[in-house]
Image: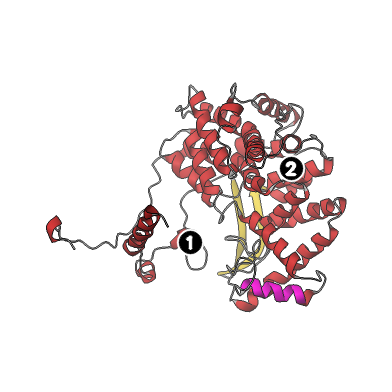
């Protein structure tokens, strides 16, 4: 090893010694790690009128797990999907709802769509000078860099008036698909030596249609493909103020920072494997199961392999069955419930029925295997990530784009929360940390060991 690497190893040991806190201290001072108590309840840090999650009900004073529900501005997300799924694409319609608080009529939706379409443009030579200049396999880093660079093109970057922030947010909602897709194509060309093609988005297409069109060399996609992707975007668009990236949005907003810095911070939060990268782990795990279980219809063989994964004997040996369980939901994730039917339709169209049957079997068996090993206080069920990765694989979307697609959807929720925080902001969000440091006497240099 090089000298510097050895030095960093030594310094890392010092960091571990200096920064380690005894676990019992958290109990002694009643610190709720991860802003959650031992029962998984989150610390209330704010109010929101944007969305609501239900995973428990009170019965005779007792908190009982229930089927999960998710509301956007008071509307059940399942009912929203039912309302548009066969009539029109829903991303723009539900985005209007989250930003402005009401479902749009036809004229309002048309105007909003036209405003987004008009904003689907990047500054002159931005793609060449910024996106393609330093391509990275980490498209989230590329996306974050592009967002921060866009700030230098905005003469009103630091203006935090509601009118200006709304303009900035709608602009970013419009260009996120371009920034992500172009970032992927640059990486794929310069690092994978593949052909380069940059398709301009169409004003006439929805966000989901433009995404598929810009990603594919031949620009072609089926209506079913676009509709399933559209529903995936809607279901990932918002999830309460308590998720990590949305809380990050509100924290940085409360400091008075500009929109580009706020969204860059949210992107940095989302890219973590504990947040937005979960569906990638599901796909990798499923590939491992498919490779190691010879008969996918043999329930006992599948159950046995799931136990190996849970016992840290298989796959990545982390002891996790990815896509199972959720920090909030108990008996079910409503997003997974509504999504599953569309996943089945796409699997049938793509000749992937066998894969879908395996996913369905694991969705049924995994909670049983998990509950056999550990006491689960709130139940375990498949979350939306369990099926979203499968959908993206059927849409031939590269793994590198999975988390950026999450960001393309979630920026609408981030924007709504930024605006709500700005309008109601009173104080900077400044959480308290209990210091357990001990005071020490200063030691002169010549007396130090």
Number of residue marks:
2
Locate residue 351 relative to residue 314 in the image: left or right. Answer: right
Q: Nearer the viewer, residue 114 or 194?
A: 194
Locate residue 43 relative to residue 99 in the image: left or right. Answer: left
Image quadrant of residue 333? bottom right
Residue 202: image location, x then y, percent: 74, 27
227 w.r.t. 382: above or below:
above
Q: Which residue is mark 2?
A: 230
Is residue 303 part of the magenta span, yes or no? yes
Disc number for residue 3: none
In the image, what residue occupies the spot 71% across and 32% down? 197
402 w.r.t. 359: above or below:
above
Q: Which residue is mark 1?
A: 36
In the image, what residue occupies the spot 64% across and 75% down? 371
Residue 422: image location, x then y, percent: 47, 36
121 w.r.t. 218: above or below:
above
Asked if the residues shown at circle 2 and circle 1 are in contact, with their CB atoms under 8 angstroms apart, the answer is no
Quadrant in which the N terminus is drawn: bottom left
Image quadrant of residue 201? top right
Residue 449: image location, x then y, percent: 19, 63
- Looking at the rendered structure, the secondary structure element under dot 1 is loop
Q: CA distance from mark 2 to mark 1?
A: 33 Å
Magenta range: 301-310
Disc nearest the viewer among 2 and 1? 2
Q: Residues within 10 Å of mark 2 (few under 14, many from 20)?
A: many
- Looking at the rendered structure, the secondary structure element under dot 2 is helix
Is residue 297 part of the magenta span, yes or no? no
Q: Is residue 162 among what the camera can see?
A: no
Majority secondary structure of the magenta segment? helix
């Amino acid at each position: 090893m090089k000298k510097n690497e050895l030095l960093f190893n030594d310094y890392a040991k010092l960091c571990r010694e200096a920064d380690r806190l005894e676990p019992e201290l958290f109990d002694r001072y009643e610190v709720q790690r991860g802003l959650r108590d031992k029962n998984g309840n989150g610390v209330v840090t704010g109010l929101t009128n944007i969305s609501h999650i239900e995973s428990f009900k009170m019965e005779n004073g007792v908190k009982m797990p229930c089927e999960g529900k998710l509301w956007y501005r008071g509307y059940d997300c399942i009912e929203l999907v039912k309302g548009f799924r066969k009539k029109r694409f829903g991303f723009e319609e539900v985005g209007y709802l989250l930003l402005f608080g009401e479902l749009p009529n036809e004229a309002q939706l048309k105007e909003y769509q036209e405003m987004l379409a008009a904003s689907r443009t990047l500054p002159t030579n931005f793609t060449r000078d910024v996106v393609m200049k330093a391509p990275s396999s980490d498209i989230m880093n590329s996306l974050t860099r592009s967002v921060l660079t866009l700030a230098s093109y905005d003469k009103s970057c630091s203006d935090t008036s509601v009118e200006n922030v709304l303009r900035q947010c709608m602009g970013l909602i419009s260009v996120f698909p371009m920034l992500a897709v172009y970032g992927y194509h640059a990486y794929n060309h310069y690092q994978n030596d593949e052909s380069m093609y940059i398709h301009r988005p169409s004003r006439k297409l929805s966000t989901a249609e433009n995404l598929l069109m810009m990603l594919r060399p031949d620009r072609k996609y089926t209506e079913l493909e676009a509709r399933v992707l559209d529903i995936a975007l809607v279901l990932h668009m918002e999830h309460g103020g308590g998720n990590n990236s949305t809380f990050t949005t509100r924290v940085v907003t409360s400091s008075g920072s500009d929109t580009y810095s706020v969204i860059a911070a949210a992107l940095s939060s989302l890219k973590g494997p504990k947040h937005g990268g979960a569906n990638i782990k599901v796909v990798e795990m499923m590939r491992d199961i498919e490779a190691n279980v010879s008969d996918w219809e043999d329930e006992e063989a599948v159950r046995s392999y799931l136990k190996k994964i849970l016992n840290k004997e298989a796959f990545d040996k982390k002891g996790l069955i990815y896509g199972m369980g959720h920090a909030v939901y108990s008996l079910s994730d409503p997003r997974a419930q509504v999504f599953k039917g569309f996943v089945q339709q796409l699997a049938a169209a793509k000749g992937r029925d066998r894969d879908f049957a395996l996913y369905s079997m694991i969705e049924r068996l995994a909670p049983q295997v998990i509950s056999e090993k550990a006491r689960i206080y709130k139940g375990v069920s498949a979350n939306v990530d369990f099926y979203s990765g499968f959908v993206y694989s059927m849409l031939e979307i590269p793994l590198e784009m999975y988390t950026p697609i999450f960001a393309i959807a979630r920026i609408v929720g981030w924007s709504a929360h930024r605006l709500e925080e700005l309008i109601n902001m009173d104080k900077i969000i400044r959480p308290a940390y209990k210091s357990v440091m001990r005071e020490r006497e200063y030691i002169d240099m010549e007396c130090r060991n």
